[in-house]
Amino acid sequence: MIFEEMIKIIGVSVTAAAILTVVKEFLMKMTKANIRIGGAEFEVSTRESKEAYEKLLSTIAELREHPQVFIAYPHAQRDFALKLCADLVSTGVKVWLDEQEIKPGETISRKIKEGMNESQWIVLIPPAEEHNKGWVFKEMQMALEAEKLRGRPIIIPVKTPTNVIPNIFSDRLWADFSDKYEEGLHNLLRGIVRKAEISKT
Amino acid sequence: MTDFWFNVAWTVLIALATLLSDWIAAKFISLTRGFTAMQQAVDQAIADDSKLQQVKEQLERMEKRAKASLIWGADLATVAIGLDLATLGLWTTNQTIFPFFQKWNTNIVNREIQVWLLLIVTHLVVLLFSIVFKHLHGERIEATDASELSGPLHPLKWIPQNCWMLSSNTLGFLAVLSCLMIMSNTI
């Protein structure tokens, strides 16, 4: 009699434990989180790493082929920046340019920070004087901070016929537009547009 | 008989509460832990092919962590010990409140303390085993490739893969059920 009771209690416990474990498994399957990569945001499930990886790969491939670029420039280089923006857009690169993105009344520093976070690369056109304290200097500081946080080089300095590359970037290869514009653009694109094909293994 | 099923229902409710609180915690943790590191790894992979493997590993690690977090047996065993102590507290003020402990007394021998000790030690042993099973399950999940991990829709693969987890959860469930059965004098 006692033995039968024990068997019944254990049987009920095993069944209930199995059912509750399955319930939790389904609850965990529903646990998803949003990941922000550049400007793109998508849901990733913690339970389906294979599907999530394939989803991520296609996003990475898209961002490699059509990255977003933040252009930081001093007012004196506005014409050069606008031309560069138009040329980049014509090659399929998305461009974040302050005068197109910031609307009257919006907080400049906040919008710049958002723009940098959403961009895969920051193209920095330094001013003619190294110790310029204008907005481009602030943008350079913010870009350096973003680079540190993201753990990879995201700033690409651009040398124009009239500007000076700051000492802090002396160890970094810049895109040289000072001689031939087309050559500089080609080099810049080589730096920001990567091959889209990624092995899925 | 009805009392027994009432006890089962209460145990299921306690288990569900434990399980839901664990799930809510996991939901918030997954939004901060792991995802931030992966977000950075994905951003780095845009510029560096070698980081792709890191992204894959990060995702697999998250999947394994989520799999390993399905264990709630040890939590229930802890709840059972908590219930034991609460019951003991009530029992010390009124020894007739739980007749189960008086069952073992004879006219000349009083065995209530021995029964209490046996009950608490048994639940401690159950807790110990459920923790051991939890670690064994964690080790098994860690050693299994993420692509090999199956869901409950494939029971033939899922049950052997999660036998330690099911054992741990069953022990936890048994601990709380036994506690409630003793309190309600159903045994």
Image: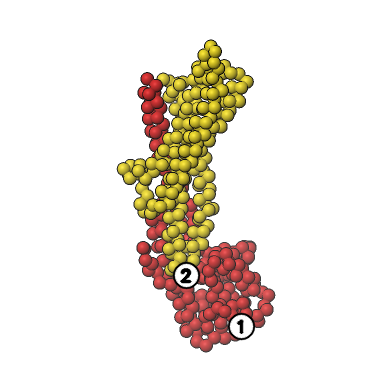
* Residue A23 visible somewhere in the drawing: no
Residue A50 lies, with reference to residue B137, above or below; the image says below
Which residue is identified by label 2? B47
Which residue is identified by label 1? A164
Tell me which amino acid carries mark 2: Ala
Tell me which amino acid carries mark 1: Val
Numbered disc total: 2
Element marked by disc 2: loop
Q: Chain of mark 2?
A: B
Quadrant holding the C terminus of chain A: bottom left
Residue A169 lies, with reference to residue A52, above or below; the image says below
The lab-note entry on whether marks 2 and 1 share a chain reads no
Rendered image coloring scheme: by chain
* Residue B166 visible somewhere in the drawing: yes
Q: Residue at x 56, y 82 (%)?
A: A159
Please indicate whether residue A136 sits to the left or right of residue A51 in the image: right
- Rendering coords of residue A91 (x, y %): 43, 75
Q: Residue at x 44, y 59 (%)?
A: B57
Q: Chain of mark 1?
A: A
Please indicate whether residue B134 sits to the left or right of residue A117 in the image: left
Q: State which chain is coloured red.
A: A
Q: Residue at x 37, y 68 (%)?
A: A197
Q: State which chain is coloured yellow.
A: B
- Rendering coords of residue A38 (x, y %): 50, 63
Element marked by disc 1: loop
